[in-house]
Amino acid sequence: MDTAESALERAVRGYLDHLAVERGLAANTLASYRRDLRRYTEFLRDRGRDSPEKVEEEDVTAFLRSLREGDEGRVALGASSAARTVVAVRGLHRFLHREGLSDGDPAGAVRPPTPPRRLPKAIPLAQVERLLEAASIGEGPRVLRDRALLEVLYGCGARISEAVGLDLDDLDGESGTVLLRGKGGKDRVVPLGSYAWEAVDAYLVRARPALVGTGRGTPALFLNARGGRLSRQSAWTVLRTAAGRAGLSTAVTPHTLRHSFATHLLEGGADVRVVQELLGHASVTTTQVYTLVTVDQLREVYVAAHPRARGSAPPARGRLPSQDEA
């Protein structure tokens, strides 16, 4: 390995160490950054940039263009994936400049592509209930575990990694809450409804002892057939199986239950700031996208119910009247 490669790799390694130790990024996020930056350093080497100091803004711009158009047999990335990669590149150069490892920030003026705004996918409560009932089909410890897992995912809006990361000590039956370990090492305490608690209690009393007996003992709440902690992949399988049994035509993912949790709360009158805390969003802006879903539903109800709303198109936007005109 030549000196140029070593310099690039050292720069990336230092940045990743910073993200892991000082920023506390989750392992999955770090893996994404590592993969994106590996593609970036390979691109720079092909352009003859043998050190971070020699990278120019045009290099970063060309890299973004290559992401969108594809290069060297790579598949072109969509706006969302390309934007994520550019965020990693911008963070790297910002870090190197701040640490005095480069004279400037060649990525500072490069803006990631704006992905199309997509509304979160949520399913109606009736479909959630069908999904939960489908998870209860059958006999044995894993059936009780699967129902408890899905009840927790929907009951507190947990991410899949947060749900499978739960330990027994994270449950507080007296207060009716659970401790979720979120992104970036940010913990939050959220309430869990009575239906979810009943499912968890049934699992703890009638199923978990049989599962834990097959392993070496673990504090994990949700266990696999060998007595170890249930993996994210296995939790995905649980959900897909239940969705298939429920006959749901919509593609259901763990995040579907999280989106449904948030949407149903807002429909029920919950304040967006409260939902922000429950979801563990750092910014309320992230949570406010859910309000677009409920606004669409409100509009449908309005058009269907208001006597002067049917069949009318919204007026063209013109100049708003001044205070004097008003």
Image (spheres, helix red, strand yellow):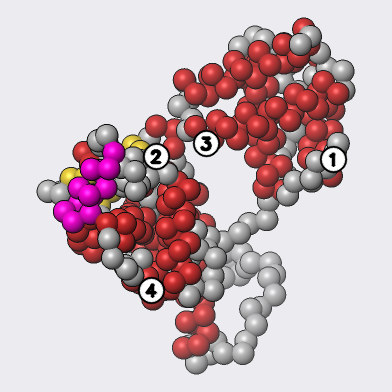
What's the residue type where badge 2 is placed? Answer: Gly
Give whichever of discs 1 and 2 has the lower sequence position: 1
Residue 45 on the magenta span? no
| CA distance for labels 1 and 3 | 26 Å
Seen in the picture, residue 29 relative to 311 is either above or below; the reply is above
Magenta portion: prevailing SS class:
helix
| Tag 1 near tag 2, CB within 8 Å | no
Task: Return the x and y of residue 68 as percentages of the image width and height.
Answer: 80, 44
In terms of secondary structure, where does tag 1 sit? loop
Give whichever of discs 1 and 4 has the lower sequence position: 1
In terms of secondary structure, where does tag 4 sit? helix
Q: Which mark is residue 130?
A: 4
Identified at 55% across, 30% down, the residue is 30
Identified at 78% across, 25% down, the residue is 42
What's the residue type where badge 4 is placed? Answer: Arg
Furthest residue toward left: 174
| CA distance for labels 1 and 2 | 37 Å
Q: Nearer the viewer, mark 4 or mark 2?
A: 4
Task: Return the x and y of residue 257 as percentages of the image width and height.
Answer: 43, 60
Give whichever of discs 4 and 3 has the lower sequence position: 3
| CA distance for labels 4 and 2 | 28 Å
Q: Quadrant of the N terminus?
A: top right
Magenta stretch bounds:
204-215
What's the residue type where badge 3 is placed? Answer: Asn
What's the residue type where badge 1 is placed? Answer: Gly
| Tag 1 near tag 3, CB within 8 Å | no
